[in-house]
Image (cartoon, rainbow, N blue to C red):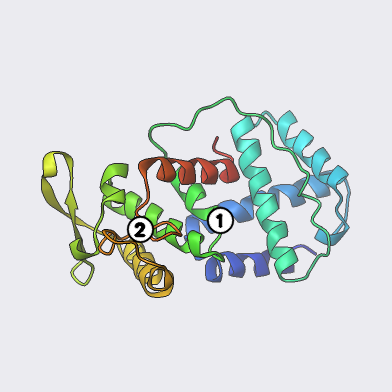
Amino acid sequence: MWEAYKKGYKAYLRLEKSLSDHSVEAYLHDVTKLTEYLQIVNQEKNPAALTLKDLQAFVKWIGELGMGATTQARIISGIRSFYKYLLTEQLVTIDPSTLLEAPKTRRKLPDTLSFEEIELLIGAIDLSSPEGTRNKAILETMYSCGLRVSELVGLKISCLYLDIGFIRVIGKGDKERLVPIGSDATKYIKLYRENIRVHQPLQPGFEDILFLNKFGRGLSRVMIFYIIKDLAKKAGIT
């Protein structure tokens, strides 16, 4: 009975959230894990019939399988995303995952992230908000171009050569270099500039800075770290 829900969720992740195939499969795997548990305990319930108690029992089960706290937190994040989709499509009226607690992880945000962790970070972005579109462009640009945070916050519109697939980066000691930029990063920079940034107020001195806060000023390094930390928490990485 869950196949129709998973099919709709898959389309939602691809079309509405614009996730990569890898991220889509990761989220679907989380839902599949839940359905596996329901089959094992002979609970033939649809998503609308599940309660917080059912989900808590599921979390206990995956813990007993020997999964680490980070993996459990990621799966819980996937279940929450699934129910967010169900609420959006009015397929359920109550979200039992709202009060579902993830296990505490004592791991600090690492200096470097794996491919899977970067995909989870990007997948945790809420594209329904203006900040979400901006953050998507930020992470795609950092990932595609391998930029330092200081280089990202200083990135200028005049240094974008998106039509030929390059950006000009000003690094340490004001040294400049041309860096290739991928199609996904290009796509979301254009979406951000054409649909979000164009409607923002611009403070004097920040007209050429690409990524702005809601007040029309450039982002600080601290703000970028905060954005990443918040997304990591939502993705179950912290």
Check residue 211 in the rendering and tell me which mark sits there, or answer none: 2
For the view shown, which residue lies furthest in the top direction?
A: 106
* Amino acid type, callout 1: Glu
Give the SS element for disc 2. Answer: loop
Q: Position of residue 182 (x, y in %)?
A: 29, 61
* Amino acid type, callout 2: Phe
Task: State the CA–CA distance, disc 2 to disc 1.
Answer: 30 Å
Give the SS element for disc 1. Answer: helix
Q: Can residue 19 be seen in this view?
A: no
Q: Between residue 77 and residue 59, name the one nearer to us.
A: 77
Q: Residue at 18%, 69% (x, y): give it.
A: 164
Q: Position of residue 144 (x, y in %)?
A: 31, 53
Q: Which is closer to the viewer, label 2 or label 1?
A: 2
Q: Between residue 98 and residue 60, name the one nearer to us.
A: 98
Is residue 238 depicted above or below 206 in this figure?
Answer: above
Residue bearing the label numbered 1: 25
Q: Earlier in the sequence, mark 2 or mark 1?
A: 1
Q: Where is residue 129 in the image (x, y as percent from the top left)?
A: 55, 64
Is residue 187 depicted above or below 97 in this figure?
Answer: below
For the view shown, which residue lies furthest in the front direction?
A: 204
Q: Between residue 169 and residue 46, name the one nearer to us.
A: 169
Q: Residue at 32%, 43% (x, y): give it.
A: 149
Q: Position of residue 83 (x, y in %)?
A: 73, 58
Q: In this view, does 59 lie to the left or right of 28?
A: right
| Image quarter of the N terminus | bottom right
Q: Between residue 71 and residue 187, name the one nearer to us.
A: 187
Q: Residue at 21%, 72% (x, y): give it.
A: 163
Q: Can residue 13 be seen in this view?
A: yes
Check residue 2 in the rendering and tell me which mark sits there, or answer none: none
